[in-house]
Amino acid sequence: MAADLKKSYRFALRSACYITICTTLLLAFLLWLFKVEYLLLLGLFSICVFICTFIILQLRIERFIYRRIKKIYDDVALLESTNFGSGPITTDMKTLTAEIEKFAKDKKIEIDTLNIREAYRKDFLGNISHELKTPLFTVQGYILTLLDGAMDDKNVRRKYLQRANKGVERLIYIVKDLDMITKLEVGELNLEFVDFDIIELIQNVFDLFEMKAAKKKIVLTFDMDYKEPIMVHADRDKIQQVLTNLLVNSIKYGQENGTTEVSVENLIKNKVIVRVTDNGEGIAPHHIPRLFERFYRVDQSGSRAEGGSGLGLSIVKHIIEVHGEKIYVESEEGVGSEFSFTLEKSHSENEA
């Protein structure tokens, strides 16, 4: 603090010294010129001039700088004006320069972040409008056709109502997924943590999608024969949804006669990592950073033809993050993709 004060008053101190020396020399010259010898008077005069000059300079400089610095701070809203009343304004400009540079840097980061968010917002609104208008127009088209007279034909009426119902179901599916993501983000979706066998859960999901995979001649399999259960501590239903979404994507983008392989490995003492690997189409590097965005699709046409809300991977990411875990993705075009996520082992597993 002493060093800061010394530095801050350096300008006024040096200026007072220069003025005192010059004034004293002038007075000494006048005394010599008029042959008057008052050495004591000369010394007292020098001290008085120094003190008065220092006080006047410091007060003037403080007032001068205070007005300008206060205006700068008020303009950039960096500090409240009340901050200037709590202590003296010194002649040290280094602090001001550092504050302004920090302010400019922070503002640049803030502006860049806002630009990114604005671009994401526009992209998100465009995607959600596209996702919603497709089933809406479908439903509207069938209803208008029925109103135009097609309802008189019993067979046509039934077929069109069934198709309109599928469109409504798709809308409900999208809205439910959006509602789930929103609840996950704001923490309103409570997780029910239990201990369960992750191997058994994966096998259950395999059984659910065995028929779907068989249509594309894709084999769902483990990387090895797990003879012992692997107990984890998590929300069983939510982890089942994670596995479901990952396997559905794997089947959707998988190659015919392909394989989707799931492995569970020890990561560290209290963690396991679950890997879902396929030998499908793979993902281009520029898509990977955006894979978990809402409605983001790598293949615009193919994925829509296969159905889905476009929210699957976004839900996966949110569920894993709400668990306090991490999700990873590695992919190479024409080779395949691997999605992996961590889970906490159950307490019994840790003790074992």
Image (cartoon, helix red, strand yellow):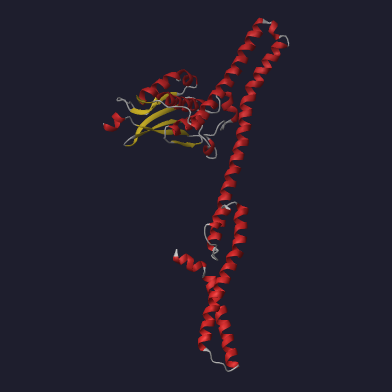
In the foreground, 332 or 193: 193
In this rendering, does residue 306 appear at all?
Answer: no
- Relative to the observer, which residue lies in front, 335 or 289? 289
The residue sitting at 58% across, 50% down in the picture is 107
Task: Say left or right for 286 vs 324.
Answer: right
Front residue of 115 and 219: 115
Measuring 59% from the left and 61% from the top, which residue is drawn there? 66
Image quadrant of residue 203? top left
* Residue 335 versus residue 241 in the image, above or below: below
Residue at the outermost right position:
148
- Left or right: residue 349 compared with residue 100: left
| Residue drawn at (31%, 25%) of the image | 229
Count all numbered tags in the image, as a single digit. Answer: 0
- Looking at the figure, which quarter contains the N terminus? bottom left
Q: What is the x, y in percent for residue 128?
A: 61, 29
Residue at horizontal 44 percent and vertical 19 percent from the top = 208
Q: Residue furthest left?
A: 352
Figure check: 181 above or below 50: above
Locate residue 129, reporting x and y percent.
63, 28
Residue 308 sits in which quadrant?
A: top right
Up the image or down, 55 lies above or below 327; here it is below
Instruction: Please tell me which residue lies in front, 264 or 348.
Output: 348
Q: Position of residue 175 (x, y in %)?
A: 56, 24
